[in-house]
Amino acid sequence: MVKEGKKVRIDEKKNRVTVTFDTRFYEPESIRLSVNDFRDCCSAKLKSEDGKITVVLSPKSKEIDINTLGYEFYNYVLGRMRSSESRF
């Protein structure tokens, strides 16, 4: 079953989540750093084109809830952006 929102696409059959970021609003460096931070719990692929960055996450453990993974990743990216803003 595939569930799709505007920016998060959940594919339960393939056990992966696709998350799309618009680089006008999300810092590419924060997205890349977040992908690296998630590599312990997920396999991750990153693709950049046309002002958008797409991240495909596949959990390495069945304990990770595929239905919340994409949203957790979004929140993590936002947290990274916020913490980088506070350094200036």
Image (cartoon, rainbow, N blue to C red):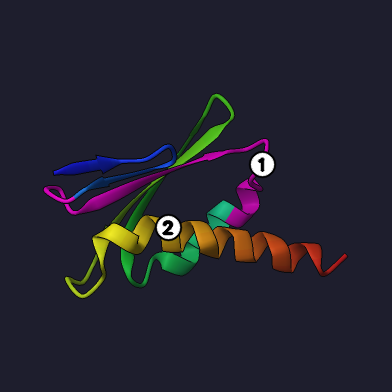
Q: Which residue lies furthest to the bottom in this view?
A: 63
Residue drawn at x 18%, y 54% is 15
Q: Is mark 1 on a helix, strand or loop?
A: loop
Is residue 2 shown left or right of residue 45? left
Residues in magenta, as a range: 12-30
The question of residue 19 being in magenta is answered with: yes
Residue drawn at x 43%, y 64% is 72
Residue drawn at x 74%, y 64% is 84
Q: Which amino acid does label 2 sit on?
A: Tyr
- Corner quadrant of residue 65: bottom left
Q: Is mark 2 on a helix, strand or loop?
A: helix
Residue 60: % across, % down: 23, 67
Which residue is under mark 2? 71
Which residue is under mark 1? 25
Q: Nearer the viewer, residue 40 or 69?
A: 69
How dense is the environment of label 2, judged by Cα within 10 Å: few (below 14), some, or many (20 and up)? some
Q: Which mark is residue 73?
A: none
- Corner quadrant of residue 39: bottom left
Residue 70: % across, % down: 38, 55
Quadrant location of the N terminus in the rendered image: top left
Q: Which of 83 and 2 is in front in this view?
A: 2
Q: Can residue 67 be seen in this view?
A: yes
